[in-house]
Image (cartoon, coloured by chain):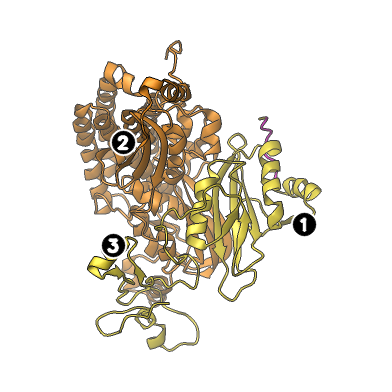
């Protein structure tokens, strides 16, 4: 990318507006949201405006707070899986995987390679579908309607595949502690492969519609610049952090679920503006396809759940119906939950929005004593007051879209 | 900011103990973890950030160890090194069980602002020197800290946040009808009827009356 264009300095913009006496106006306060099409959910921004320029921004959260952490303390580990669907509801499979990996870290349980490969394929499909939605919605935010139609067509194909795998399009609840709910159906992997083949050229076409589009560039380049230092200070993760030029990707740097077996590149931005974050997401989709292709090529045979995890993974149905021990075991796991050792673990996975972390304090037994969910959207949004300052109201829309957050995850 | 590689756990303990003799290793299932006296946490986090490359403040949270326990609350910080890719967990107990406080680290990481607001909101830990310690997920004026162990899962009846609406409608925020939840059987000496999840119904349904306001 050329680097010779000058970025408008947002602080200087504000200073000019305040200094020029003929433009001096009374400050106005504007409540943007909670039901505003560009806030992607129920986020409310309490803006303080000087004319068109934002001089203050106070995000108001909590409209979607359901007390997930409190709920988690009152149910068994497996019962909480459906609640993870409802964190980032645009990529439920990725959340399922992150949660299962966190609890397995507590149990010091290794799942078989086939299970890991299934989880990787699921996570990457979820990443593609979440980025497709983010891209489509971002297009609408900045006035490019057609993108949305193309990305949603592709997303629909993914949802068909999710439905075939998990039985649900949206709330998949696919993982269990120590495995997944069921093995992949026959012929499913080939269908995913076929999807990837036809998806790549379409993705290029979709990105072509935006990447060199003058209107899109004008709305995004040089807008909402987040410096490397700021990105780290505010705890940004995921594409937003990488857009600012920090090459931190947990799949690469703290590999889990067998990510170390696959080759892929980590895309980073150069300027940290909205356009860079868009470019990073575009490239991530290409890399996700690359990972899925590799996972399918080397798709391992064998078990898809941890067979030796007797008190953790519920036995197969046919065994429950024929063996007394397995029946008792199934009963215990269902009523008291998978048995975990006491201890404290913190595990983070790279989900589409960033690093989704679970801090679990266990006193043993089937129910966590305390579970903190570290949601990437919450941290990513915390930079809003800083990054909106000095921008136009219309740029706020552009910035919100580029941060690509989900309130279900932010508010928990 | 120079970012040398993160030291392994034992070295990190030595590093911390050199400056903070009270630091002790904490049992942990995965990452290096250390217990520190509350007052020394900001200095220790600054040391880890500036000299050992832990440049990302991942999370701040708190644990309520039980209503009867003392110290009742611990605050937990998680740091990550963006270059060496290691986590570290710092835990400090709050001295006061009734009015727990902790020092704010907003001056070290701007991102600590919202984490501390959330911990204050849900757990009731006051962060001293925090620039703007308001509730973040619950509404302003909400009287409870829901993640504390003495707060019931169903919730407690609370007036609506908007007093005008509350006056007009005479409505309030009611505890959730649990209808047999929480859904986990109890273990131990109980007989089957008592151990059954439905026996633990903490809240109201068609037959039970509503719990009184706390």
Q: In this view, does A363 lie above or below A250?
A: below
User: Which residue is labeled 1 in the image?
Assistant: B22
Q: Position of residue B122 (x, y in %)?
A: 47, 60
Is residue A312 visible in this depiction of the protein? yes
Instruction: Please state which of residues A2 and A348 is positioned toward the viewer in this rendering.
Output: A2
Q: Is residue A401 above or below residue A256?
A: above
Cα distance between the residues tagged 2 and 1: 48 Å
Cα distance between the residues tagged 3 and 2: 38 Å
**Is residue B99 shown in magenta?**
no
Magenta residues span: B2-8
Which chain contains the residue that carries disc 1?
B
Between marks 1 and 3 in the image, the one whose residue lies nearer the viewer: 3
User: Which residue is labeled 3 in the image?
Assistant: B164
Which chain contains the residue that carries disc 2?
A
Say which residue appears at 27% left-offset and 19% top-offset: A215
Per the rendering, the mark at residue A377 is none
Q: Which picture quadrant has residue B173?
A: bottom left
Instruction: Please state which of residues A244 and A283 is positioned toward the viewer in this rendering.
Output: A244
N-term mark: 1 or 3: 1
Horizontal side of residue A155 vs A50, given as left or right: left
């Amino acid at each position: 990318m050329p680097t010779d264009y000058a970025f408008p300095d947002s602080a200087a913009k504000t200073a000019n507006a305040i200094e020029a006496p003929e433009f001096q106006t009374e400050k106005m306060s504007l409540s943007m949201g909670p039901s505003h099409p560009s806030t992607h959910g129920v986020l409310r921004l309490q803006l303080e405006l000087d004319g068109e320029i934002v001089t203050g921004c106070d995000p108001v959260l909590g409209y979607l707070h359901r007390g997930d952490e409190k709920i988690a303390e009152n149910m068994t580990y497996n019962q909480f899986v459906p609640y993870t669907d409802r964190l980032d509801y645009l990529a439920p499979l990725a959340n399922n995987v992150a949660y299962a990996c966190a609890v397995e870290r507590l149990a010091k349980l290794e799942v078989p390679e086939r299970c890991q490969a299934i989880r990787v394929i699921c996570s990457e499909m979820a990443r593609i579908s979440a980025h497709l939605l983010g891209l489509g919605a971002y297009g609408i935010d900045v006035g490019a309607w057609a993108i949305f139609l193309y990305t949603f067509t592709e997303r629909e194909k993914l949802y068909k595949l999710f439905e075939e795998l998990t039985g649900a399009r949206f709330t998949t609840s696919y993982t269990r502690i120590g495995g997944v709910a069921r093995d992949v159906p026959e012929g499913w992997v080939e269908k995913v492969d076929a999807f990837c083949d036809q998806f790549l050229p379409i993705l290029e076409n979709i990105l072509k519609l935006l990447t060199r589009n003058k209107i899109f560039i004008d709305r995004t380049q040089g807008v909402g610049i987040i410096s490397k230092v700021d990105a780290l200070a505010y705890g940004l993760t995921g594409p937003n952090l990488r857009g600012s030029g920090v090459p931190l990707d947990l799949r690469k740097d703290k590999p889990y679920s067998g990510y170390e077996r696959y080759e892929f590149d980590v895309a980073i931005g150069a300027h940290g503006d909205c356009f860079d974050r868009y470019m990073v997401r575009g490239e991530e989709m290409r890399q996700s396809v690359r990972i899925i292709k590799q996972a399918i090529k080397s798709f391992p045979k064998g078990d898809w759940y941890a067979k030796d995890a007797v008190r953790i993974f519920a036995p197969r149905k046919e065994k429950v119906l024929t063996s007394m021990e397995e029946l008792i075991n199934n009963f215990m796991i269902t009523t008291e939950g998978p048995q975990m050792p006491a201890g404290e673990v913190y595990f983070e996975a790279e989900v589409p929005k960033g690093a989704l972390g679970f801090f679990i304090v266990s006193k043993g037994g089937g129910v966590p004593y305390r579970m903190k969910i570290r949601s990437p959207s919450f941290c990513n949004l915390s930079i809003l007051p800083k990054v909106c300052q000095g921008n136009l109201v219309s740029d706020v829309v552009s910035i919100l879209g580029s941060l690509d957050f989900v309130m279900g995850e932010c508010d928990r | 900011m120079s970012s040398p590689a993160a030291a392994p756990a034992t070295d990190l303990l030595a590093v911390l103990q050199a400056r903070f003799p009270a630091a002790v290793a904490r049992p942990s299932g995965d990452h290096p973890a250390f217990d520190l006296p509350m007052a020394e946490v900001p200095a220790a986090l600054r040391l880890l950030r500036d000299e050992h490359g832990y440049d990302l403040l991942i999370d701040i949270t708190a644990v309520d160890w039980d209503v009867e326990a003392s110290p009742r609350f611990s605050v937990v910080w998680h740091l990550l090194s963006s270059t060496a890719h290691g986590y570290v967990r710092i835990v400090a107990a709050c001295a006061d069980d009734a009015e727990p406080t902790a020092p704010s680290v907003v001056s070290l990481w701007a991102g600590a602002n919202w984490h501390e607001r959330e911990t204050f909101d849900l757990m009731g830990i006051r962060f001293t020197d925090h620039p703007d310690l308001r509730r973040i997920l619950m509404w302003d004026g909400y009287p409870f800290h829901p993640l504390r162990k003495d707060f019931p899962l169903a919730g407690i009846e609370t007036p609506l946040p908007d007093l005008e609406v509350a006056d007009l409608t005479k409505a309030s925020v009611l505890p959730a009808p649990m209808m047999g939840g929480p859904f986990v059987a109890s273990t131990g000496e109980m007989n089957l009827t008592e151990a059954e999840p439905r026996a633990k119904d903490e809240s109201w349904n068609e037959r039970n009356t509503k719990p009184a306001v706390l």
